[in-house]
Amino acid sequence: MPLPIVPVAAFALRAGAVAGLVWLARRTIVLPGRTDQRAEDALDDLGEGLSLHRPADRASVDTRQTNAAGRFRRTLTWSGGGVEIDAAWLGRLRIRKV
């Protein structure tokens, strides 16, 4: 049974128009970026894996702080080349009694 082309074409035109508007908005609105070298160095120094800890100097009655850090680093290769994936993150959750 053949597929009706009109509904598919209407969806494709609508999706293309939305994608074009997003592309145009992204090209016209340029936000200046900034790289903090201290943060880059901290992320480079992380070990691979996941780490959660509560600092002893922050363990008061009013403040409970938990820090988390993680890093995932893999190299994927195939016959035409390859890519290296390096994902690192730092996080903090602080709950303070008011």
Image: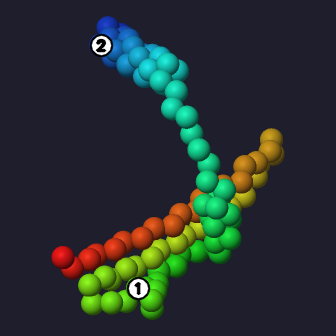
Question: Left or right: where does residue 34 sit relative to residue 64?
Answer: right
How far apart, in angstroms, are the residues tagged by discs 1 and 2? 60 Å
Left/right of residue 80 with respect to residue 67 in the rendered view: right
Q: Residue at x 52, y 21 (%)?
A: 27
Location of residue 51 in the rendering, given as x and y in whole percent from the top left corner? 52, 79
For residue 58, which numbered disc appears in the image? Answer: 1
Kindly give the residue lying farthest to the top in the view shown: 6
Judge whether residue 28 can be spotted in this image. Answer: yes
The residue depicted at 27 percent of the width and 90 percent of the height is: 61
The quarter of the picture where residue 63 lies is bottom left
Q: Which residue matches tag 2?
A: 7
Q: Is residue 39 left or right of residue 69?
A: right
Vertical order, 26 against 97 (above or below)? above
Judged from the image, the secondary structure of the residue bearing numbered disc 2 is helix
Question: What kind of residue is marked 2?
Answer: Pro
Circle on res. 43: none
